[in-house]
Image: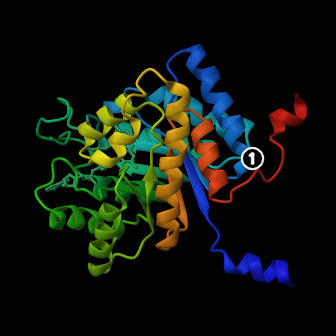
Amino acid sequence: TEAGTQRRAHAPISVSFEFFPPKTDAMEASLWQAIRKLEPLAPEFVSVTYGAGGSTRERTHSTVSRILAETSLKPAAHLTCVAATKDEVDAVVRDYWDAGVRHIVALRGDPPAGAGTAYAAHPGGYQSSADLVAGLKTIGDFEVSVSAYPEKHPESGSFDVDLDVLQAKVDAGATRAITQFFFDNDHYWRYLDRVRARGINIPIVPGQIPIHNFKQIAGFAARCGATMPASTAARFEGLADDPETTQLVAAAVAAEQVRDLVKGGVTEFHFYTLNRAPLVNAICHTLGIKPHAPAASAVNA
Ligand code: FAD
């Protein structure tokens, strides 16, 4: 049929959403508002971050458990191996497996003494992210996603070292890499070329962060080594006190960026939602991703 032909003509796009565990009741309420708004978009999975040094261990677990219990979403739990023994990490992993979690985003984590200092593995812990991935696989047949850095990791001496690390994670069983966010797609394309030239064939899913607040996102970018192009910064100039216009500009900027990525063949996106739905929801709509079914909460309301 014509409709069938049209459907085949468009590569299906899939998305995933990242949340962070809330610290207060008010933050919990706004997180759940965001989850309910985004749930009908039927993301591939939603992930929940793990605080630096495992500082949110319980909160990550309870957020993941609530997603499993109360939504139709498939949760992925972020986990780091910094400042913890193997036994401590393995106990967290077994709890996830027993709770029904089947997807882990496995990370090394930031240096225990803070960003900018040298990383030191815990003597009794997993020595690297690849070591953690291998450990996870001995506990359960988890789907394992890992990180990738289109502009290099801030501690990295060269792309070659980064690619060695990525290769080691793939060899240990990782089947998807999610990138650090970036604002200039050329960084992504060049990185993808390097990855493929190394014979690494897992999906390299672009991580996207909507610029809901320019100053805040520019600050994140500076800290994690993502370049903020002058042309992007210029679009937000003069809007520091105008959140409403900022949202509109941010939606336009993000729509352009994802459209260019789709043109280049990207079919999977990961959104750093910062626990906010509106911009991510708008960008998904521009990608053609519409609600599949009313959210349970909307039906019950
Ligand atoms: P890896 O991929 O293991 O390594 C990062 C880089 O360090 C390498 O590319 C390389 O340059 C260098 N390196 C590592 N090992 C060696 C070695 N043996 N020799 C030389 N160089 C080496 N942090 C959190 O605390 N909680 C989270 O939930 C979280 N989620 C994240 C999700 C995504 C998608 C991304 C991209 C990052 C996330 N982070 C999170 C941040 C991450 O923990 C930090 O960037 C950390 O510094 C590196 O962890 P990694 O697993 O990316 O490191």
Residue 134 visible to an observer of this rendering: yes
Q: State how many labels appear.
A: 1
Residue 103 vs 237, above or below: the answer is below
Residue 24: where, in percent of width, then height?
Answer: 53, 15
The N terminus lies in quadrant: bottom right
Q: From this viewpoint, is residue 108 visible? A: no
Is residue 227 found left or right of 92 in the rendered image? left
Crowdedness near tag 1: few (<14), some (14–19) or many (≥20) residues, C-alpha within 10 Å: some
Q: Nearer the viewer, residue 154 or 61?
A: 154
Above-or-below relation of 183 to 200: above
In the displayed structure, 89 sits above or below 173; it is above
- Mark 1 lies on a secondary structure that is helix
Of residues 238 and 233, the one nearer the viewer is: 238
The extreme top residue here reads 25
- Residue shown at 63%/55% (left/top)? 286
Q: Is residue 68 left or right of residue 122?
A: right
Left/right placement of residue 229 relative to residue 138 reads left
Identity of the residue drawn at 75% across and 46% down: 40
Q: Amino acid at mark 1?
A: Pro
Quadrant occupied by the C terminus: top right
Q: Is mark 1 within 8 Å of ligand 1?
A: no
Q: Which residue is mark 1?
A: 40
Residue 293 location in percent, x, y?
83, 50
Q: Position of residue 256 (x, y in %)?
A: 50, 56
- Residue 117: percent from the left, percent from the top? 12, 35
| Coloring applied to the structure | rainbow
State which quadrant residue 217 falls in: top left
